[in-house]
Image: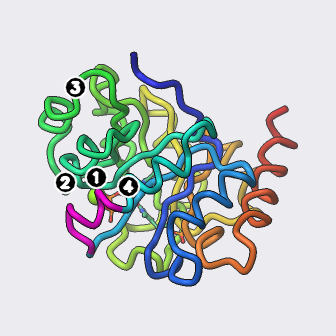
Amino acid sequence: MKPSFDLSLYLVLDPGLCAGIGMVETARRAVAGGATMVQLRDKEGGTAAMVETGLALKAALAGSGARLIVNDDVAAAVEIGADGVHIGQGDMSVIEARALIGPEMLLGLSVETPDLAARVDPAMVDYVGAGPVFATPTKTDHKTPVGFDGLAAQVAACPVPAVAIGGLKVDHVAQTLAAGAKGLAVVSAICGQPDPEAAARRLRAEIDRLTR
Ligand SMILES: Cc1ncc(COP(=O)(O)OP(=O)(O)O)c(N)n1
Ligand SMILES: Cc1nc(C(=O)O)sc1CCOP(=O)(O)O
Ligand SMILES: [Mg+2]
């Protein structure tokens, strides 16, 4: 059966920003603070490193209820036995990815325009990463920032739940949720923060305040 998932606080890991305590410990602390999804994103590492870190993440998150998603590398996601994989418009096609992961893993897809959002096939894709809301130094090749109005247009056009991404911090929770996104995907708001658990807890508290 496909795992249930909660997009409300989606941590995307960055090996550089997490260099102090590492990606696994950052994820563990973020989940203790209320992160619901963790994406292993390492653009440099290669499949073997992804698998090694992914297996350590899987062990660290076991029993927490948080879902483990692998960015880009579908083969690594399958080898890890992750909950899912996230791909972008320039990565492997949705059809190819779904064929490799089978029906029971989650598939996330990035969209950057309402047109791309409208073309998402809900039979294939479980959620989208929508944005970028703001420009961010974390991903230097990001597409044109769309702001909250652009985010709302993407969400409205999309047949599956959306998590917003791109420069999001605790001050943006209200506008992100008001735009219709189910949650926030963040890198630098947690990775490399002096206290990643406290950073996640602040985001969690604001999300809960506005949704409960
Ligand atoms: C949740 C989430 N949303 C968007 C992205 C970006 O994916 P992509 O466009 O494939 O870019 P890279 O992350 O691969 O550089 C994401 N990773 N996660
Ligand atoms: C991984 C990623 N994808 C983006 C997109 O626009 O698709 S922006 C991004 C990085 C987001 O980092 P931060 O939370 O530090 O701004
Ligand atoms: Mg990608």
Q: Marks 2 and 1: in contact by CB < 8 Å?
A: yes
| Res. 88 mark | 1
Residue 54 circle label: 4
Q: Is mark 2 within 8 Å of ligand 3?
A: yes
User: What amino acid is labelled 3 in the image?
Assistant: Gly
Q: Secondary structure at mark 2?
A: loop
Q: Which residue is mark 3?
A: 102
Residues at marks 1 and 2, CA–CA distance in whole angstroms: 5 Å
- Label 1 and label 3: CA atoms lie apart by 18 Å
Q: Main secondary structure of the magenta part?
A: helix
Dot 3 or dot 4: first in sequence order is: 4
Q: Earlier in the sequence, mark 1 or mark 4?
A: 4
Q: Is mark 1 within 8 Å of ligand 1?
A: yes
Residue 133 is left or right of residue 102, and the answer is right
Quadrant housing residue 94: top left
| Left-right relation of 196 to 66 | right
Task: Please tell me in which quarter of the rendered image ligand 3 is found.
Answer: bottom left
